[in-house]
Amino acid sequence: MSTRTYYDPLHQSITLNSSIPEEKMVMELIDSSPFQRLRRIKQLGPAYLTFHGAESSRFTHSIGVFHLARRAINHLSSFDSELKEHKFILYGASLLHDLGHGPLSHTSEEIFKIKHEEWTAKLINSNQEITEILNKYGEGNAKAISDLIQSRKAEKKVIVSLISSQLDCDRLDYLIRDSYTTGARYGHLDIDRIISAMTIAPDGDLAIHPKGLMAVEHYLVIRNLMYRSVYNHRLNEVCNWLLEQIIKTARKIGPKKLWADKNMSEWLWNHEKMDVKSFLSNDDIVTGYHIHRWQDSGFHNLKNLCKRFIQRNLLKALNISSFCLEMRLEALAKARLLSEKNGIEPDISCGLREQVVTSYHPYKYGLRLWDGDNLQALEKVSPLVERLIEPNQSSWLIYPNEIESKLKIEIENLKMKNN
């Protein structure tokens, strides 16, 4: 028998025991090349330019998600002993759920136009190393895990909810981890209370015992605050917009004029037909190296964008969320005009970043309370949760520092005109 312990700053000791087959599988998956790549993918993408401590990786997060899934299923097995037979599927899915992330995590979905769930499923089914490990511990495990991640399919409903729901192990880990690394101080979740309150409803799906209501309300409020203060922070939006413009500009230049190595060329100009090998070849280091190299390219717009990002010479952002669509577009037009007058290329210095966040979706795998007699939708019991259903839209006008004073005057005039 051999054990291995990962010392996590949040969950403390996460110990794996090779004499337990499903944990031995996890150890082998962690040691695989595709999973080790996650060490080179930042959990929060370019947020480290806003929050200097945001340096944790998808590797760290994925092990944390597995740890919470293991705790949850051990607790829920007291309600349904058959759940123990599904540990291989749950452990594999919780550990590998982010395997298909591209460079800088969610940012790559915007800039490279990929979906990480699709690539996760593809890697689980197509990467020989991963597939062999999974199927060695049960024929068809790889397909079952990919179906769970991509299509929310599993024999037990509660297994699906632990991987993909409004109270899944992924969200529980990333909220406390992202709060910790960014210094936001919001994410002090009562994980013990939440897991101990997990139960199984009569339909076999996940439910919460009323004793955990306040802990779950707290969790949903924290999620709302984290989106507003961290994920949609104005400078984070600027960094993501800059990266999007870098890749968009590089793609326009084309493979015949712009230098890129073989694998980055696939990501830039053949992403829809890219093979598994090319996908795995890219990470934060490779993408960052190309952005460094493009600082010295002969293409003015690309060169300036890359310098802005690498040297953290960030653009400004103004919150215009209260504006109607027509006013937002007019504000962007004014920023572009002022930039041109100042000799600044508006295509690479002016833009809009818009996001709509809903803190709780009652019809998208919503939560229920179950006390052994009554099953109730969470929002019907909690006025606080009901208020979190309303979408929250953010809209940031991005512009260069050189036009700030004149732009603010123009924005004030625009407000007065529309009042």
Image (cartoon, rainbow, N blue to C red):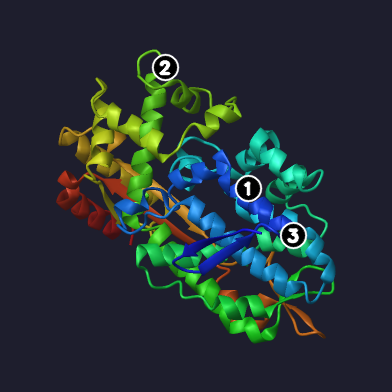
How many numbered marks does the figure carry? 3
Q: Quadrant of the C terminus?
A: bottom left
Q: Which mark is residue 347?
A: none
Q: CA distance from mark 1 to mark 2?
A: 39 Å
Q: CA distance from mark 3 to mark 2?
A: 46 Å
Q: Which residue is mark 1?
A: 28
- Is residue 175 positioned above or below 243 on the image? below
Looking at the rendered image, the disc whose residue lies closer to the viewer, 3 or 1, is 1
- Of the pair 389 and 286, the residue shown nearer to us: 286
Circle 1: element type: helix
User: For the point 35% across and 67% down, which residue is it?
Assistant: 183
Using the rendered image of the protein, determine whether residue 217 is visible from the camera's viewpoint. yes
Is 416 positioned to the left or the right of 114 in the image?
left
Q: Toward which corner of the image does residue 54 lie, by quadrant?
A: bottom left
Which amino acid is tagged 1? Answer: Glu
Is 96 positioned to the left or the right of 125 in the image?
left
Q: CA distance from mark 3 to mark 1?
A: 15 Å
User: For the point 40% across and 33% down, which residue is it?
Assistant: 286
Q: Quadrant of the N terminus?
A: bottom right
Q: Which mark is residue 255?
A: 2
- Is residue 243 positioned above or below 228 on the image? above
